[in-house]
Image: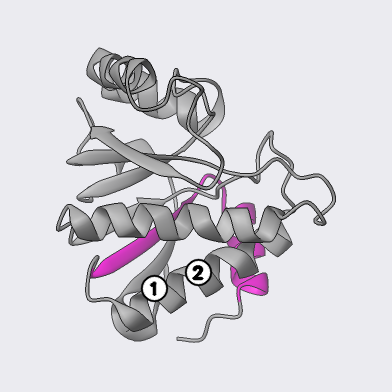
Amino acid sequence: MSGPFFGGRLTVATGDITRVHADAIVNAANSSLMGGGGVDGAIHRAGGPSILEECRRLRATRFPDGLPAGDAVETTAGSLPARWVIHTVGPIWHGGNAGEPATLARCYRSCLEIAARQDAQSIAFPAISTGVYGYPRESAARVAADAILAWLSANDLPRTVTLVFYSGADEAVFLRNAGLHA
């Protein structure tokens, strides 16, 4: 684990987000909310059918056309060691001139807003959009760090944020590019 940063409120780790003990974990979802590959599939598999059941209800009611990129919604965490899963849809990378940085920052803010509203003390994020959505990890690191630090500067909740990377190499890319200082 790296850090802590920002007075102990932000840490960076390598591991499996489905095993993180936090009030909320973030799912880098697709707009269908029906599960998929990567983090999305792992969260649905580890959390069990209750997450998918709740996602189906959300699609039938609030999001019939799917969850828009940049938005977020919470569900149960099922069998996960968290209280909630906050699903967010990151932008697909189209070269950086199609609003991707603003949409990615909105993903982080939307999740943090939900966590605060739920009175979550802790939240864990994966790297949003850096997998099959193709967002360059170096650029995504700076956007994520800026959005999270701006939130933490202005809000008391959540008290702690953990960024959980699948590999040490991904964590290292983040740390080199995020502009964080202990």
Q: Residue 35's x, y, as percent?
A: 46, 20
Q: Residue 152's x, y, as percent?
A: 35, 76
Q: Does residue 175 belong to the magenta stretch?
A: yes
The disc placed on residue 151 is: 1
Q: Residue 44's x, y, as percent?
A: 37, 22
Q: In the picture, which quadrant includes the C terminus?
A: bottom left
Mark 2 secondary-structure assignment: helix
Mark 2 vs mark 1, CA separation in Å: 6 Å
Q: Residue 36's x, y, as percent?
A: 52, 20
- Tell me which amino acid carries mark 2: Ala
Q: Which residue is mark 2?
A: 147
Q: Say which residue appears at 26% left-offset and 55% top-offset.
A: 115
So how many labels did they put on this image? 2
In terms of depth relative to the viewer, which is nearer, 181 or 167? 181
- Answer with left or right where residue 94 lies relative to residue 45: right
Q: Say which residue appears at 35% left-offset and 39% top-offset.
A: 73
Say if 125 sits above or below 43 in the image: below
Would you call the spot at circle 2 few (<14 residues within 10 Å), some (14-19), or many (20 or more)?
some
Asked if the residue under mark 1 is in contact with the one under mark 2, i.e. CB atoms within 8 Å, the reply is yes
Magenta-drawn segment: 159-178
- Answer with left or right where residue 31 lies relative to residue 98: left
Residue 151: which quarter of the image?
bottom left
Q: Is residue 16 visible?
A: no
- Tell me which amino acid carries mark 1: Trp
- Answer with left or right where residue 29 lies relative to residue 115: right
Mark 1 secondary-structure assignment: helix
Residue 7: which quarter of the image?
bottom left
Say if 148 sits above or below 134 in the image: below
Residue 45: which quarter of the image?
top left
- Answer with left or right where residue 126 lies relative to residue 75: right
Q: Say which residue appears at 17% left-offset and 41% top-offset.
A: 83
Say if 122 sits above or below 17 in the image: below
